[in-house]
Amino acid sequence: MRAQVAEDIRWLFASQDVNEAQDNLEHLVSKYTRKAPQLARWMESELPDGFGAYRIAKSERRHLRTTNIIERYHREIKRRLRVTGPLPNEASLLRLVTAILIEISDEWETGRKYMTVKELIRL
């Protein structure tokens, strides 16, 4: 049943817009009401929180659905830490990681942008 529920939730969030997602959610709740009433109640109360993603342009939703960017930054931090070798204490590690993240943030602010300020304000 777990695989079926996961597939149904993926189907729900593959909806084209919030109205379709609401209709699909109603379908899922009715589907699970008899088999798993607790799951149906959970779906009805918790899944609509994810519908906020439909306010973002469809072309930008991919960035919200994946963790690729976070994984990329983890690899970048690990790569730079390997180059520096052992650090004397935890505070120096924190300073180095903070500096790396500030540099990445600066690149984002001045370089590649996948969302404009107008789109962020709209959220």
Image (cartoon, rainbow, N blue to C red):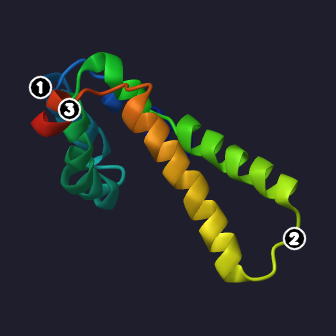
Badge 3 density bin: few <14, some 14–19, many ≥20, Cα 10 Å:
few
| Residue found at x 20% / y 50% | 44
Q: Is residue 8 visible?
A: no
Estimate the x, y position of residue 46 in percent, counting from the top left: 25, 54
Q: Which residue in the protein does label 2 denote?
A: 86
* Quarter-of-image position of residue 12: top left
Q: Is residue 18 left or right of residue 103?
A: left
Q: Secondary structure at mark 1?
A: helix
Q: Earlier in the sequence, mark 1 or mark 3?
A: 1
The amino acid pointed to by label 2 is Pro
| Residue found at x 54% / y 53% | 101
The amino acid pointed to by label 1 is Asn
Q: Which residue in the protein does label 3 denote?
A: 117
How much space separates mark 3 and mark 2, taking CA atoms? 40 Å
Quadrant where the C terminus sits is top left
Q: Secondary structure at mark 3?
A: helix
The amino acid pointed to by label 3 is Val
Estimate the x, y position of residue 82 in percent, counting from the top left: 85, 55
Task: Say the numbered circle drawn on residue 19.
Answer: 1
Q: Earlier in the sequence, mark 3 or mark 2?
A: 2
How much space separates mark 1 and mark 2, taking CA atoms? 54 Å
